[in-house]
Every structure is written in structure tokens, then in C-alpha cells.
Image (spheres, helix red, strand yellow):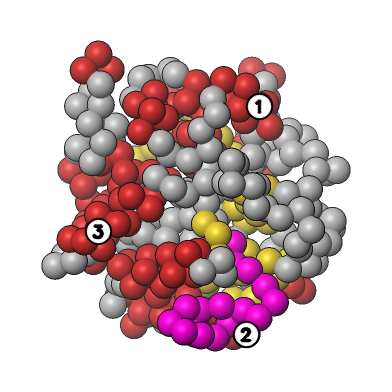
Amino acid sequence: MSIADPTQLDPDFHAYDLIGDVHGCADALLALLDGMGYRRVHGVWRHPKRIALFTGDLIDRGPAVRETVLRVREMVEAGAARVVLGNHEYNLAGWFFPAPADSGRDWLRARTDRNAAGLEATIQGFDGHPADFEATLAWIGELPLWLASPALRVIHACWDAELMAAFCAEHDERTLTPSLARAACYRGSLVRRFLDRILNGSELPLPEERVMHGRDGLRRRSFRTAFWTRDARTLGEVAFQPDPLPDDVHERAIEDHEREHLLSYSPHAPPVFFGHYWLSGAPRLQAPNVCCLDYSTVLGGRLVAYRFDGETRLDPDRFAWIDVSREERAG
């Protein structure tokens, strides 16, 4: 690993276990690690031959956020794991980051009731442990924005090569530094667009200003789209989210102006792993070199891993997972 660039993985090492969004489900995480041959040695979960790579979103929603963060931090500090920044870690950091006076906002993360509710489980999880909470906030600022080697890539939500190249050409930061957070406070800035893309993915507006009601109870005027193909014919074929589109929208052909905003991921690029999208059912590949690992752990789904050994075409038989019980989901 390059000290100067925390996003870089050892180019000569390939034995990685990619793990999807944990969201405070510590029992499921420890069960998954145990099932993959990790053991707690001198207080740290580790594997004798492999390293765990997490797609971010360790926090929020689940019953054991603090324990999740502590266990994963121990692994990272011991060299047994790496973690990329997730949108939930970014949201937590932004809640406490004061915005510049000329940015038109008070905080990087707006202090609305909706945003407060999203952080409730994390704030409560650290209640009575202020030192651990402050250490976690500092640690979030050290998480790489992505991870990469010639063999694979890891990012929380979306690998947009063009936008990443533009960001790297103008900025040297590869973690959420204070200067990067300040730049993200300005609407329309490259940093803000870049962080939104890698942490939240790409979207298209619903046609005719339609509104969808998600299973999380929120109203949305846009929907998440796949970043690995522009060849879809209909809006439903490019949608990538847990909530289905209305039937008429699902079947509507993609118009030229919409296709211009769709992304693609080269079939010749290294395999890319990510979380974020709240999938369900049996783990599956999105393409031979594209793999989402978020299977709605905290909603009673599965905590999913992929056991990578350097293959250029991913193998669906390499998934491992734990079914999360209703008891753990509820705490």
C-alpha cells in the first residue's frame, strides 16, 4: 500500500474478502467472518491469508453500531481490513462539519428532521461513550474514497471513470479532509458532484415530474440507475434500486436526452465491487466484472461477501453470506 495514496492496494496481493454494507449488524458481521475462517487473535478478527475489504456504511440503522465500528477499526489498524467511505459515514461527518459563511448553508449536512432521523441509531449507539464517538469521527476522515489495484476496484456506490479523472486532475485528497469537506459545501462544485456520484450513484428524474413513495416512507422524484451499461432499452432495464418503478414508467423507452446521462463500465476494466443499493434475494453478479454486495442486511436480508482471488471474470460460486435474523435486526 502506498503511504502517499491510501486508495491504492498492494498490486501483488489478491486474496480479498469483499464485504457489503453492515449497518450496525455486528452479530451478523462476526458470524460471517467466522464462517470465512477469520478468528479473533490478540483481540482482532483476522484471517491467516486473506484481507477483508468493506464497501462502507458500517453505521446507522442497526442495533450495534458502536461494536461494529470498534471491531472493524481494530481490523484496519492491524492490517487485517480496509474500508472505503460510505454515504452514511459522510452524512455523519457532515452533520458536525460547519460550512463556510459564503456557502449558503450552516452545515455540510443540513440539520433537518429527516437527516437527524437517519443518524439516530448511530448517535444512540455511542451514547455514554464520547471518546469512542470522537475517535470514530476522526477515523471517518481517514477512510479512502475508493480502493484500487490493477486487479480490482472498490467503491461505495458508483465508479464513474470520467468524473473521477476530473476530480483527480484537480485534487490530491483521497480521504474526506477538512478542505475537501469545505469544497463540498458549495452547490455545483466539482467536489460536491464527485462525492455525490461515488457515494450515492447516478440517477434519472422520473418522467413528467412523477413522485414515487419508497419502502422507506420517503417521496422521490428520481430513481437510481445502473452505472455499468448504457445499452438498456427501457427505464426499467436501467433502474437499479429496491423500489420498482410504476409499470408505465418501467416500460417506457429511454429517450436520447436521458441516455446521455447514463454511465457505462468497460467489460475490460478490473472487477468493481460496491454496496449501497439494498438488493434482495440470492446474491448475483451484475456483469462478469461488476458486483454489488448490499443485500439489505439491516432489513432482515443478508450480509454478503465475495471471496476474490484475482480472477478477471467473477464467479457467482464465490459468494458467502449470513441470513440476518429478525432478532438482530430489531436489536
Mark whose residue sits in front, 3 or 1: 3
- Give the x, y percent position of residue 173: 51, 33
In primary-sequence order, the first of circles 1 and 2 is: 2
Q: Give the residue number, with chain letter if any, for mark 2.
A: 37
Camera-side residue of 73 and 124: 73
- Judged from the image, the secondary structure of the residue bearing numbered disc 3 is helix
From the viewer's perspective, is 204 left or right of 65?
right
Q: Give the residue number, with chain letter if any, for mark 3.
A: 133
**What residue is drawn where x is 43% and y is 65%?**
73
Please determine whether, in this image, residue 144 is positioned above or below residue 188. below
- Judged from the image, the secondary structure of the residue bearing numbered disc 2 is loop
In primary-sequence order, the first of circles 3 and 1 is: 3
**What residue is drawn where x is 38% and y is 28%?**
179
- Give the x, y percent position of residue 325: 42, 81
Give the amino acid type for the residue marked by disc 2 in the picture. Gly
Camera-side residue of 278 and 304: 304
In the rendered structure, does residue 50 fall within the stretch colored magenta? yes
Query: What is the CA distance from the residue labelled 3 to the residue labelled 1?
Result: 34 Å
Q: Give the residue number, with chain letter if any, for mark 1.
A: 165
- Give the x, y percent position of residue 236: 62, 42
- Judged from the image, the secondary structure of the residue bearing numbered disc 1 is helix
In primary-sequence order, the first of circles 2 and 3 is: 2
Please determine whether, in this image, residue 175 is positioned above or below residue 102. below
Does the rendering let one see residue 87? Answer: yes
- Give the x, y percent position of residue 177: 41, 36
Give the amino acid type for the residue marked by disc 3 in the picture. Phe
Magenta span covers which residues? 37-54
